Image (cartoon, rainbow, N blue to C red):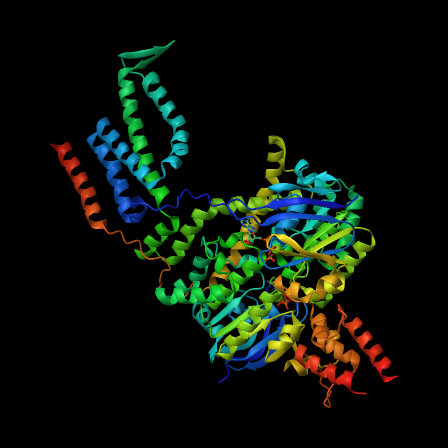
Amino acid sequence: MNLIDVQNLHFSYPEGIELLKGIDLAFDHRSTAIIGQNGAGKTTFVKLLKGLLKPVSGDILINGVNTKEISVAKLAAHIGLVFQNPGDQIFKSSVYDEVIFGPHNIGIPEDEADESTKKALIEVGLENKVNDNPYDLSFSERKLISIASILAMNTQIVLLDEPTIAQDDYGKQLIQGLVRKLEGEGRLVISILHDMDFVAETFTRTLVFQNGKVTMDNDTKSVFSQTEAVRRAYLEPPHVTQLGNRLGYTETYLTAEQFVKDSLRKREEFKQ
Amino acid sequence: MSKVVVNNLKYRYPLTENLAINGLTFEIEQGELIGIIGRNGAGKSTLCAALTGLVPHFFKGAYGGSVHIDGINVKESKLSYISREVGIVFQNPFTQMTGAKETVKEELAFGLENLGVPKLEMLRRIEDALNLLEIDHLRDKNPLELSGGQMQRVAIASILVMHPGLLVLDEPTSQLDPQGTAEVFRAIKKLSNQGMTIIMVEHKIEEIAEYADRVMFLDNGKIVAFDTPTNVFSMNHLEEHGLRPPVFTRVCKGLGIRDLSGLYPVTLSEAVNEVQKFNESD
Amino acid sequence: MQNISLYVNKKSFVHDVDFLTKLIYIFVFIAIPIISGSVIIGLLAILISLILHTCAGVLKKLIPIVALSLFVLLSVIIVQAAFIPGYHIVFFSLGPVHFYQEGLIHASLIIVRFLDILLVSSLTVLTTRPSDIVETLQRKGLSHRMGYVINSIFQIIPQMVSSMKTISDAQRSRGMETEGNLFVRVKAFLPLIGPVVISSLVGTRERAMALEARAFSADAKRTYFHEEMKYRYKTPVRIILLLLLVVSIIWRVL
Ligand SMILES: Nc1ncnc2c1ncn2[C@@H]1O[C@H](COP(=O)(O)OP(=O)(O)OP(=O)(O)O)[C@@H](O)[C@H]1O
Ligand SMILES: Nc1ncnc2c1ncn2[C@@H]1O[C@H](COP(=O)(O)OP(=O)(O)OP(=O)(O)O)[C@@H](O)[C@H]1O
Ligand SMILES: [Mg+2]
Ligand SMILES: [Mg+2]
């Protein structure tokens, strides 16, 4: 069974125009990036998956359960969402309390909750800020707190809304490691991103949102190989892909390492 | 006279132990486009606050050295005066709306009303900014009901309309889609060519390499390097300060492509040229 | 963010009237029925206000406001007509409770005044944009800091509502039950209060910086994005209103 099934999903905000115009998707455990223009409806879509918004028509099934038929709170044990704005998510006055809030609510026993909270804080590198007030921390650290508070709940599905905002290279690598680890454990990570280099290096599958529809849905490499379609969706291929394209290479490169390795090999072959 | 003169600037936030900024000395000329880079906690936002007078007027704490803008000491003048000359777009777009206005166009007008800009001029500037940031279709929307990227565009526009002589941008494109990012960089480059002095904090290193005249690389409140993108990104040991050079530079480093003085390509077009030569050489 | 200010954005000649003229209208139309002491005059004032509501297309919005006040009105009737001692002429009886004629007359006077005040103010509230009110005051010399404060007061409730919604979303997202029967809702509501207060305090600091960045404290002579509400018939309307007031005073004194 799919972890998530989306069937003919339509959505509009009250008094707004139709934003999502019939989306059909199925998610297995492959890590998936969602990319698309500002205002395309990406955040709205993950809020629908999370159950915070309800479809105007169509259905969303999480592990076979329709989001219309279960409370958000009950669903929370299965699906976690890191909000785009950490300010929308954080409401406790210590980092520890913030992160343990979820585990407590979904009924994880105290010592286990404590353990997974501490583990999550180590995973995002905030183990030294356990007792700080989240409001005193920087924007990038607040984003990491909101990631930790979802990790601590050990949900089968993790939704990340622009997790790399404000992160430096170290923070990005850390998040990349987390995504790969979760995928390796058979858990589903769906993440919205505007950083195409990061998408290319990290995600197995990529979806493009445009004009209320999913216009591209494929493994990441195939998506970025269609340069024209990507540009039409107000996106750009990753920088290294652009380099390969400009050089007239037919191969679609997703990482600098691959590019270098191939170039050196071709040069060797050429020399012989 | 330089537009910005900073002399041995030091600053520590109240109730903290370490200097967030630890002895910065530099000058910036009018019309320059400066990129500020560095890892989280390096002191980038604090420097922005010091350049716009929020440090020390808004954030108290220990302050040493000086910041002069157009020859005027920021510490000794009032915020009300500085805010006419210096514009700042903050890191977090979600907290930059005034909360007093019901539509995007009124939100853009807010600063202009405060500056006393005449009505006709106001309308012209607002139209320009709406077009430049491609938010014309949002003009009558509530600023608090926008997507993250839309809000960030409004935040940039609402400062741009004020036509500051010095514009400080703290990660202004963090939530923009790739084409939006490119457009903002192009627009900013154009403004700088027209004489606006621009200081921009960014993690998007490839764009900084492409557009910045000079790059200031901060770590631990100190300047690691302040030079042209080529010089800065060709340095060794960047990784020790938490910085991954642009992907084009990394590719060229991997292929051993560099010029006689040891400099690497840093932009797409430079890399295209050099890799082509590399492929054709034997 | 929900906009729950009562203002109805429409075009009508009532909407066109500037705020100061409306203030005069409020004052005159409340004063005249009181000065005259006549129920008929009061009813006439109510009728005029009702017509104006209709012209402005806000009559529908009036219904919930009046319905809400009906409860208050009914209790006035009952108390006035039945329970105030000293009345003699029984008008009608409901079981053991007698309604006295004097009481009813008195009650109708109160009701008419009450309705009059309600209608006159609701017309202004429903047809004037809150920010126009503030801007009018600013142009008359109110400092723009005070203006901002007043504007924020108009927005306190919508802001609280939206910030409560945000935090409650954050909480149910992480497994706290907020949907269900009254008990669950109340239980979920209590832990909201702390965070809402804190977030508005923290918000205040960031907001203050955001305002500084928009030259909020600049001492330039301000200009306005919105044209000053210029009402063509401002002077004649104001004169007529004040004349009505004078006439009613004279009539009363004679
Ligand atoms: N609460 C709301 N009420 C009304 N309209 C809204 C609301 N939230 C978002 N919108 C509108 O819906 C559209 C989609 O918003 P959404 O936040 O889903 O976009 P997004 O794809 O996540 O964009 P971004 O990349 O900028 O975050 C936008 O045009 C936005 O203005
Ligand atoms: N309001 C504050 N109070 C106390 N300390 C602060 C405050 N703001 C920042 N700091 C500290 O000052 C140092 C520099 O922070 P700053 O925000 O300038 O870094 P930054 O380079 O902008 O980082 P980022 O990339 O995360 O935005 C950090 O050690 C930070 O913890
Ligand atoms: Mg979004
Ligand atoms: Mg910063």
Q: Quadrant of residue A266?
A: bottom right
Residue at position x 81%, y 87% in the image: B282
Q: Specify whether A267 is left or right of C89.
A: right
Q: Which corner quadrant holds the C terminus of chain C?
A: top left
As rendered, which of A45 and C160 lies closer to the eye? Answer: A45
Q: Is residue C211 visible?
A: yes
List the single residue furthest toward the bottom: B260
Horizontally, residue C163 falls left or right of residue C225, namely right
Is residue C38 or residue A109 the one in the foreground? C38
Q: Which residue: 68% across, 36% down? A: A69
Expressed as whole percent of the image width and height from the top left, the position of residue A141 reads 67, 60
In the image, what residue occupies the spot 26% across and 36% down?
Answer: C30
Residue closer to the observer: B156 or B87: B156
Which residue, as the protein is rendered here, is positioned at the far top? C95
Q: Residue at x 36, y 20 (%)?
A: C79
Residue A114 screen position, x and y as percent: 77, 47
User: Height in image: B11 above or below C248?
Assistant: below
* Apparent side of residue C185 relative to residue A156 in the rendered image (left or right): left
- The answer to whether residue B250 is above or below residue A186 is below
